[in-house]
Amino acid sequence: MPVRGSREGAYLDEQTLLAAGAPPPGSFEGNGRGSHLLGGQRAAAVSTVSTVVFIGAVIALFVFAPGAAAVRHTFFNPQQMKQAFLGDPSKGLYSVGKGLILNIEMFLIAEVLILFCALVIAVLRQLRNPVLFPFRMLAVVYTDVFRGVPLIIVIYGIGFGAPALYIRGISTQSDFVYGIAALVLSYSAYVAEVYRAGINSVHQSQVAAARSLGLSQWKSLRFVVLPQAVRTVIPPLLNDFISLQKDTALVSTLGAVIEANRAAQIDSSTLFVYSSYTVAALLFLCLTIPLARFTDRLIARDVSRRLAGGRAVR
Amino acid sequence: MRKSLVLVMFAMIGLGLTAVGSSASPVPSTKAASAVLTAKASSCSYAAIAPHLYKVGVLTVATDSPAYEPWFDNNTPSNGKGYESAVAYAVGKQLGFSKSQVKWTVEPFDASFAPGPKKFDFDVNEISYTPERATVVSFSVSYYDVQQALIALKNSRIVKHHTPADLRTYVYGDQIGSTSLAFINTELRPTHQPSVFNTLNDAKSALQDGRIQALVADTPTAQYISSSEIPKSVLVGQFPSTGEHYGLLFAKNDPLVACVNKAIAALKVNGSLAKFQKEYLGIYTSVPTIKP
Amino acid sequence: MSEPDVTPDLGGAQLGDTAQLVDAAKLDDGAQNGDPAFASQEAVRLEDVHKSFGDLEVLRGIDLSVAPHQVICLIGASGSGKSTLLRCVNLLESVNRGRILLWGQDVTAPGVDENAVRRHIGIVFQSFNLFPHMTVLRNITLGPTRVLGVPRDEAEEAGRALLVRFGLSEKQDDYPDRLSGGQQQRVAIVRALAMQPGIMLLDEVTSALDPELVSEVLGVIRELAAAGMTMLIATHEMGFARDIADRVCFLDEGVILEQGPPGQVFTAPGNSRTQQFLRRIVDAGRL
């Protein structure tokens, strides 16, 4: 296509844009190199200034706003933040820090179970053996239902429903167990779909190569498809687990699990300040930010591998 | 280059500050900017308090939803029935508001103590006064002196065995934000950590399903639960007063507090509060007292 | 999960024996003849094979017979059905009509265990299809260990021997994407050979390669032919086909229009379509 005058905007094509100094399509933030992202020294200076101004304005807002003192007292009261972190039984205050241990426990246990259950569901949906049809159907219904129902309702349903049934062994579990069961039920549906996307992203020619060696459908899946699929879905999986970490807080609605968020709620309503929530938020960030950065790194590695034409160093 | 950029930056911060400063005047509504007037509030005529109202011409009263019995009736604060609804209308009347000039608004308990302008004149929601809470909001004088009471299922061991030592052995549960929870933790000191529920209704269902063995609530609420809501349950007894009382909740240093306090005092003197208590809360002379 | 070795109507013993026809040892001696019991039989026989994808009929009645140790080259334009034919033999595609016999056994009959059939047929694809998450050695030992149940160290020993045989021993611990195309394709051939197949199907194995890498792969195939491997080769390399083939089949629009010894097909093609095709090849400088 010929490059026409720049006034004829409708005829601007990629080459015109390139000539005009615009980055080629898809190049924005593409390779994550700092200089490219900021576009040279001048841009770096501008971005520094705008960052400083922005932060300055935010700080100014907190310092000089008419209600700033009240906000600081309510949200950022160091004395009360310390109290909320450690707890004070004599005043009926719970420890947010101790609560966080419960969050971490629930997260770790649920994560292992989710990784396993979701894989089973994803594989069930993939196998074409007619004998497995009922299971395949069950897996489809399961993922549809539990992706659709809000987690909080699943937690309520299990935590309040199971004990009301008076079934031996099921109705006498702790809220901790019910909560994890609900997290696993809900998240396995999501994660199964992530796995399935990963499985579908493995090229059919890989399956053909595996089957041509005489590997059964199951063995092809097990040794050839799944290992590749899992590798592809690690970043999205980690993303799901970041939200799982936060969602462990919902289990507290069952009552007996006083995790970080619930401890903060109690402290807040006892003292009428929100500093305990600030503590909980900071603690959750301490958990999720490292995981988020780790995810970013994996994604960046994946991108660079693809940019290198699939010949990256392992 | 750098230098000029830094100058620009400071100029921009300056602009930002000016912006904050200029927006400052409208933010504190008629409610907050009037500490000066508090001294003059000795006159509590309708005309005197009118400038301090959240909305012109009406008394805006807040409570949470659901509003529990017997404090309210049928989750409808505006029907004038239930102890707190009756008190709110009586206070309004003392201040010169007709029944139609009292407007109700829903305010979740958690939000009632948030910083920033309040969306009500006062909140009436079984909120206990504590010195810590009073650093953030203002309370009226007591409109009800609270005692905590113990509810359990009729067949529970706790009905017969509730010495202070026994009381430590049970699994308790309560609604979040209630002083009853603090009472359990500081006075009963159970060995098993009490469950904490989003709502009183969740706590009740936990009691019915045996997930908790006992529930602590103020005596009127406990009475209502055991008599009307959970037939299998019984009010085991009430604990001696700890001096706890319910107060109406206001924005910190709200000039209205002084006038409302006067109104409550008048209602005490003329017997209205006692009458409402008799009418809506029943008479609890028969409730046995147990020691924590 | 274990499947029966072979289904009853597909004589397991026979296939097992034929699989021995070409093993590593025989490749080494270059033995020309296998078990006399099968020497007279056909290794592969296609009878009136039809295959459609939706409305598109790709194979329209293929009859083909391949004797043991024979090398057959399938030539023809892209889309003439060469690849599909090979995939049908390997049961990667099911035929719509007709039947395919391997050493006299109908492998298209219902109830045939396709996994059992496939372990006796090696196939090499145009795009290599190595497993990118496994090292070269692991690519090669996957089939023997997981399908044939060979102990891992034995399989690795055999695999290493094959790699040495084909000049790839230094690459055994590399991942496929570190290898050149030619090396990858040679590994793919070794991967197929590691299963000790009775027949090899080669599907345009040099088409994806840079020109300078073609010869190393062709060299390997020549070696296999010299060792007596029965092969069905779909190829665009006419010079190679002329050298190596016992018989050349020209496919056009899903049928074999002409077949015969390479000398005959390439120098005196009887069919006008074959002439046309070959002329285009010559014009392109490929023959």
Image (cartoon, coloured by chain):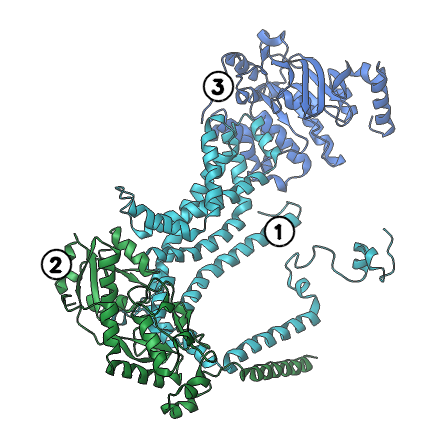
Chain colours: A cyan, B green, C blue
Residue A223: x percent and y percent?
A: 51, 35
Q: Which residue is mark 2?
A: B161
Residue B121 is left or right of residue C97, and the answer is left
Q: Determine crowd level at label 3: few under 14, some 14-19, many 20+ residues with C-alpha closer than 10 A.
A: some
Say above or below: C218 vs B186.
above
Q: Are marks 3 and 1 in contact (CB under 8 Å)?
A: no
Pointer 3: what residue?
C5
Q: Nearer the viewer, mark 1 or mark 2?
A: 2
* Side of B154 relative to A295 (left or right): left
Q: Amino acid at mark 3?
A: Asp
Residue C275 percent coordinates (x, y): 85, 19
Same chain assignment for discs 1 and 2: no
Q: CA distance from mark 3 to mark 1?
A: 44 Å
Callout 3 secondary element: loop
Q: Residues within 10 Å of mark 1 (few under 14, many from 20)?
A: some
- The reply to whether callout 1 and callout 2 are in contact (CB within 8 Å) is no
Give the amino acid type for the residue marked by disc 1 in the picture: Val
Q: Quadrant of residue A9?
A: bottom right
Q: Quadrant of residue C205?
A: top right
- Judging depth in this view, the residue of B90 and B158 nearest the camera is B90
Q: Is residue A67 above or below residue A268?
A: below
Q: Are labels 3 and 2 on one chain?
A: no
| Residue under the image location 61 percent in, 39 percent down | C176
Q: Which residue is mark 1?
A: A303
Residue C156 visible from this viewpoint = no
Amino acid type, callout 2? His
Q: Nearer the viewer, mark 3 or mark 2?
A: 2
Which chain letter goes with mark 3? C
Same chain for the residues under marks 3 and 1 in the image: no
Dot 2, how many residues are within 10 Å of its Cα: few (below 14), some (14-19), or many (20+)? few
Q: In front: B80, or B55? A: B80
